[in-house]
Structures are given as structure tokens and as C-alpha cells.
Amino acid sequence: MSTNLRSLSLVLLVGACASPNAPSPAEPAPVATQHGATSGGAGPVAPQGGDAHAEALPEQPSRRHVADVMRGLAPLVEGCVTSSGPPREIVQVAITLVSDGHVVEARFDAPTSYDRTAEGACILETVRQATFLPFRRPDFRVSFPFRVRH
């Protein structure tokens, strides 16, 4: 049973990351930054779960996968905003992921009227709840623009 589950996970992972299609030009696109060096000269640490599984993982999340996950959060992010803020704003949120796909840091990447507000805290907490497919690098940083309006 464990072998079947691993095979299914591998098929789903490869299928999700193999798409060559880029996000639509009308949609905001995530901007990746190059980080991930480890101290002591060691290379990237692969997630636990066996060498064959780790070798099948992508080096980093695909641009499309990141955009899909972040766009999926858009209704929740917009739900954080009340009518007291500006009528429409693009908030740039920078996140850091670790190799198991969890967000370990989320912050506003540019000044916004939501800095240090309850709405801003809600936006960042919502983004921190995102999960991504595992990857090989120890971490991955990306910035994504959310359009919010009330």
C-alpha cells in the first residue's frame, strides 16, 4: 500500500509540475528570487521520504504552481479587507517556503496602507497558511501581487 501511495504521489507531483504553460499575461505573475545557500558548504537538503522520491522532486516550485496556489488565496485575502481601506490596491506579499512546501515567512514587499493594521495581519496570516508541493532546495522566496478591493 505504501508503494502505491508513493507512486500516486509521484505521478501527481510530476503532473502538477510538468505543465509548460505560463500564467496569462493579464494575471499577476510571481517573482522568484534566488536564495537557498546552506551554511557549512553543504548542498540542498532533500525532504525525508527516500532517495528515489527526493530525486523526483523539482529543484524549486514552478512559476505556474506558485501562481495557482497564490491565486487560489485571492478570495480569502480579499475577505480580509473592510470598507475602511482604499477602494482598490495591489499589495505585494513576499513569502519564504521551505522544502516541504510550507510558508515560514510572509511580509509585505512594498509599502501598503495595510501595514500594521488588522486587515494587513489577516492578509499575511492567510498567505502563511498556503501549502505548496515539496521541492529540493532548502528554501525558496517569491513575491506575489494581490489585488484587493472592497
Image (spheres, helix red, strand yellow):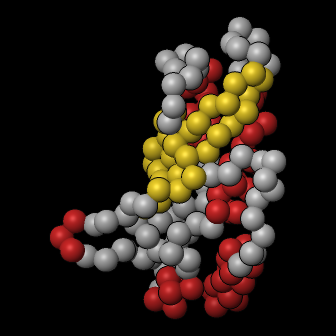
At x 68%, y 37%, the residue is: 146
Q: Can you tell which quarter of the image residue 74 is in?
A: top right
Number of numbered tags placed on the structure image = 0
Depth check: give the residue in front, 64 or 22.
Answer: 22
Q: Residue 25 location in percent, x, y?
A: 78, 53
Taking the view exactly as shown, the residue that stands out farthest to the left is 40
Depth check: give the residue in front, 130 or 7.
Answer: 130
The quadrant of the rendering that contains the C terminus is: top right
Give the left or right position of residue 13, taking residue 34 as reference: right
> Up-down: is 65 above or below 96?
below
Q: Residue 6 location in percent, x, y?
A: 64, 84
Q: Can you tell which quarter of the image residue 124 is in?
A: top right
Q: Residue 118 location in percent, x, y?
A: 58, 17
Q: Residue 113 location in percent, x, y?
A: 58, 17
> Up-down: is 106 above or below 4?
above
At x 63%, y 67%, the residue is: 62
At x 73%, y 28%, the residue is: 148
Give the left or right position of residue 101, taking residue 17 as reference: left
> Up-down: is 138 above or below 56?
above
**Can residue 140 be seen from the camera position used here?**
yes
At x 43%, y 70%, the residue is: 137
**Can residue 77 be seen from the camera position used here?**
no
Depth check: give the residue in front, 107 or 45.
Answer: 107
Q: Can you tell which quarter of the image residue 78 is in?
A: top right
